[in-house]
């Protein structure tokens, strides 16, 4: 028996993305984002409230970085989704995390996060869905400790977690249960 739940943004899992930008005087800001993701091989799309400090910074600097948060920094990641750089000037400093300037875009790279996409703004969009930033991925940087012996990112080493839009929980990513483009092949025969 199925039950109607109404109109809800109920997709699972949702990512926990850390969007880092520079504001005035190169002040670092980072926000927590679930409603973002890949939109092309070299593009990401951020669905973002336009009044966020991050939105202002992105418009002014034309760049941002997008990192995957790990469980070791879950409290900091959540804090980045509670506090706003609009109201808290020392938001990033309070977290105790560290950032360096990206070599490729005008945005900070948070040192503690294991995987970072360096992005420059490709397009700012306003439509029925609200404000959206399309970013071109100009480079990806990863901590060596999350790479396998072939130099590929090993998801089991990322120690990443996902967001649950139903009850606002965070969940550590679990075991590998299949292989894409392979587990379903038996039905092709
Ligand atoms: C789990 C989680 C997911 C969030 N996802 C989004 C999102 O996808 N888009 C958005 O605009 N805000 C999102 N937020 C809210 C912002 O992170 C929050 O308003 C933050 O204070 C904005 O920071 P800023 O003003 O310094 O940019 C999310 C918050 C949390 C805790």
Image: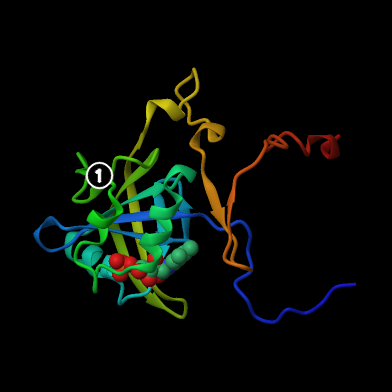
Residue 42 vs residue 180: left or right?
Answer: left
State the residue at coordinates (46%, 26%): 147
Please tell me which residue lies in front, 107 or 181. Answer: 107
State the residue at coordinates (42%, 26%): 145
Q: Is residue 91 above or below residue 41?
A: below
Residue 161 in picture, x, y percent from top left = 54, 48
Residue 76 in picture, x, y percent from top left = 38, 54
Q: Is residue 36 above or below residue 107?
A: below
State the residue at coordinates (22%, 54%): 93
Q: Quadrant of ligand 1?
A: bottom left
Q: On the image, numbered disc 1 is attached to which residue?
A: 98
Q: Which element carries disc 1, helix, strand or loop?
A: loop
Q: Cβ of disc 1 within 8 Å of ligand 1?
A: no
Residue 63 in picture, x, y percent from top left = 24, 55
Residue 35 shows in this picture: no
Using the rendered view, name the quadrant where residue 166 is placed: bottom right
């Amino acid at each position: 028996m199925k039950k109607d739940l109404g109109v809800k943004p109920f997709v699972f899992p949702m990512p926990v993305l850390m969007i880092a930008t520079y504001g005035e005087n190169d002040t670092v800001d980072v926000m927590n984002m679930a409603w973002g993701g890949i939109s092309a091989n070299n593009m990401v799309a951020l669905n973002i409230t336009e009044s966020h400090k991050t939105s202002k910074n992105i418009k002014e600097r034309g760049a941002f970085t997008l990192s995957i948060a790990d469980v070791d920094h879950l409290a900091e990641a959540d804090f980045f989704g509670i506090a706003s750089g609009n109201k808290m000037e020392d938001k990033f400093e309070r977290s105790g995390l560290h950032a360096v300037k990206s070599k490729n875009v005008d945005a900070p790279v948070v040192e503690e996060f294991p995987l970072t996409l360096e992005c420059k703004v490709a397009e700012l969009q306003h439509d029925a869905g609200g404000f959206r930033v399309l970013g071109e991925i100009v480079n990806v940087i990863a901590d060596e400790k999350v790479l396998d012996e072939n130099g590929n990112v090993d998801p089991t080493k990322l120690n990443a977690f996902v967001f649950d839009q139903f009850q606002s929980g965070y969940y550590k990513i679990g075991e590998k249960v299949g292989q894409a483009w392979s587990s379903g092949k038996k039905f092709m025969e």
